[in-house]
Image: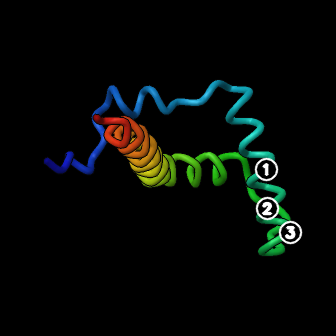
Amino acid sequence: MPRNTRMSEQELKRLELSSTQKRDLLDVLRASLREVFEIEEAGELQLSMLVDALREPLANVYYNKGVADARHFMQERLDDVASIQL
């Protein structure tokens, strides 16, 4: 059964970053914008808003990837078990 694509408040709460994590992420984002797009001055507020806007869509992608990887791993283990049947 497919899951609702919108995250609940509780799920979003689990995605919150510590101040150190957020600062590190903003530094990486700022450097990437400078290197890739030649945007020299991205403000703290703008970067925070960008991170917040991308948080849920990226979380969904990586969560689904993790679930698919776990499912593939478990299927391989089940195939191994099935191969030893007498």
Name the residue carrying label 3.
Answer: 35
| Residue name at image x 73 percent, y 45 percent | 26
Foreground: 71 or 19? 71
Foreground: 79 or 15? 79
26 sits left or right of 66 in the view = right
Q: How far is mark 2 from mark 1, CA to CA?
A: 6 Å
Residue, far left: 1
- Circle 1: element type: helix
Number of other residues with Cα within 10 Å of mark 3, as a class: few under 14, some 14 to 19, many 20 or more: few
Q: How far is mark 2 from mark 3, CA to CA?
A: 5 Å
Foreground: 2 or 9? 2
Number of other residues with Cα within 10 Å of mark 2, as a class: few under 14, some 14 to 19, many 20 or more: few
- Circle 3: element type: helix
Number of other residues with Cα within 10 Å of mark 1, as a class: few under 14, some 14 to 19, many 20 or more: few
User: Which label sits on residue 32?
Assistant: 2
Q: Name the quarter where the C terminus is drawn.
A: top left
Name the residue carrying label 1.
Answer: 28
Whether pointer 1 and pointer 3 mark residues with C-beta atoms closer than 8 Å, the reply is no
